[in-house]
Image: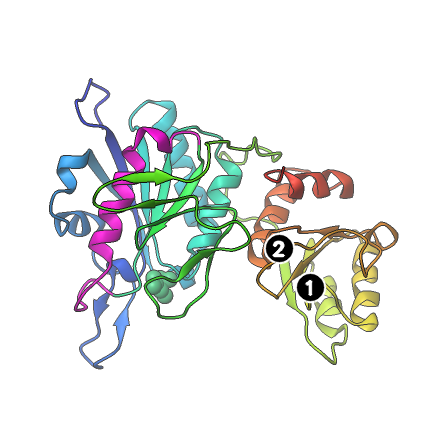
């Protein structure tokens, strides 16, 4: 991308696939394959996009986000960091599948420390569907990315006229176009043909995590173990034997688990694994020392982070050498006031 002075803001679009790039499957009336249409073709299908910004598109991957992986995450993080460092772009828009969009957005939020906007968008209907939602979402994502008031807000998710912060956004419907909600906090803003309006001031918490954007390859292994009634410790013991560095409990209620499962988690702590108590419930915070004495067991709590985001934060911390239980707990509290 040129660094010359531009009258329009410069937006780097990084395409990774997803339903937004999905095409109908000729074998079935309802089926489609996520990924397939190129980022270049996606922007060509959105009238007026070129009037919002000078666009440059790069294809980072073309996959359904069910196949999202550390390799694509690091490729995205490095490219975004390099683009901002070289003043190549004023903002970045990532096109992505919705299944793991919240995880990619949170990973990027965790490892990037830039005031320039990064907006992740996608679609619930494939590009070939009647009333495909991708073009409007892409248009709105670029519109938010270039809005002056988007600066300093970190990584955002924009779909269906709604702007979400990476920390709180989560997918709540398998099929609805309004699938993203910001649990506990609500959306941070709205975008519509008339305006981009934020509901909160721009305060981006300084992430208490190491800079990993130069790291290569894979994040350390952290398992999520889903709590349920009649729970034993077999999965916990298996994770220990299998070499996991950490376990996130998607606990019942307030991050709870049976005595048997907790005994397994204690074995994990004794073996040097980091154990984070999160909740499968979907809203509310998991606080320390309520029904479970975290101080005694040596556990960390996830506060407002859902299990899949707690896993990412723990992976990034371990990868960066932050393994002291107090430092890990402090990092989970960053972003809360
Ligand atoms: N709506 C979607 O994008 C779902 C798709 N499986 C994906 O995450 O890539």
Relative side of 202 to 255, left or right: left
Q: x and y percent of residue 328 in the render?
A: 71, 42
Q: Is residue 64 visible?
A: no
**Alpha-carbon distance for marks 2 and 1?**
9 Å
x, y percent for residue 149: 35, 30
When the figure is inspected, residue 117 is found, relative to residue 180, above or below; the finding is above
**Residue 188 percent coordinates (x, y):** 43, 44
Residue 32: in sight, yes or no?
yes
Q: Residue furthest right?
A: 296
Q: Which of 220/20 is in front?
A: 20
Relative to the observer, which residue lies in front, 298 or 211? 298
Q: Which residues are magenta?
A: 126-152
Cβ atoms under marks 2 and 1 closer than 8 Å: yes
Q: Position of residue 8 (x, y in %)?
A: 18, 27
Disc marking residue 242? 1
Q: Read off the residue under disc 2.
A: 221
The residue that appears at 44% across and 47% down in the rendered structure is 105
The residue lying at 35 percent from left, 58 percent from top is 97
Within-10-Å neighbours for mark 2: few <14, some 14–19, many 20+: some
- Quarter of the image holding residue 239? bottom right
Tell me what residue is drawn at x 68 percent, y 38 percent.
Answer: 321
Say left or right for 150 vs 319: left
């Amino acid at each position: 991308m040129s660094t010359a002075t531009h009258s329009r803001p410069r937006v780097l679009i990084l395409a990774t696939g997803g339903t937004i790039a999905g095409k109908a499957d000729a074998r079935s009336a309802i089926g489609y394959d996520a990924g397939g249409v190129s980022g270049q073709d996606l922007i060509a299908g959105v009238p007026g996009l070129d009037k919002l910004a000078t666009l440059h598109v790069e294809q980072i991957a073309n996959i359904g986000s069910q196949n999202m992986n550390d390799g694509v995450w690091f490729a995205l993080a490095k490219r975004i960091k390099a683009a901002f460092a070289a003043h190549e772009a004023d903002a970045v828009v990532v096109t992505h599948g919705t299944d793991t969009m919240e995880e990619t957005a949170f990973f990027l939020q965790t490892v990037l420390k830039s005031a320039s906007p990064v907006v992740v968008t996608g679609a619930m209907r494939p590009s070939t569907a009647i009333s495909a939602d991708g073009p409007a979402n892409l248009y709105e994502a670029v519109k938010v990315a270039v809005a002056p008031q988007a600066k300093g807000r970190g990584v955002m998710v924009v779909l269906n006229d709604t702007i979400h912060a990476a920390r709180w956004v989560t997918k709540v419907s398998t099929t609805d176009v309004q699938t993203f909600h910001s649990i506990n906090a609500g959306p941070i803003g709205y975008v519509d043909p008339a305006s981009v309006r934020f509901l909160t001031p721009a305060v981006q918490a300084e992430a208490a995590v190491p800079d990993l954007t130069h790291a290569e390859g894979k994040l350390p292994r952290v398992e999520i173990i889903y709590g349920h009634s009649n729970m034993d410790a077999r999965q916990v013991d298996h994770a220990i034997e299998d070499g996991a560095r950490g376990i996130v409990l998607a606990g019942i209620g307030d991050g709870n688990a049976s005595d048997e499962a907790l005994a397994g988690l204690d074995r994990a702590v004794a073996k040097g694994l980091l154990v984070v108590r999160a909740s499968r419930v979907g809203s509310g915070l998991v606080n320390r020392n309520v029904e479970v004495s975290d101080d005694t067991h040596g556990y960390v709590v996830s506060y407002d982070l859902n299990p899949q985001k707690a896993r990412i934060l723990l992976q990034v911390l371990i990868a960066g050498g932050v393994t002291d239980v107090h430092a890990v707990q402090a990092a989970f509290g960053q972003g809360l006031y």
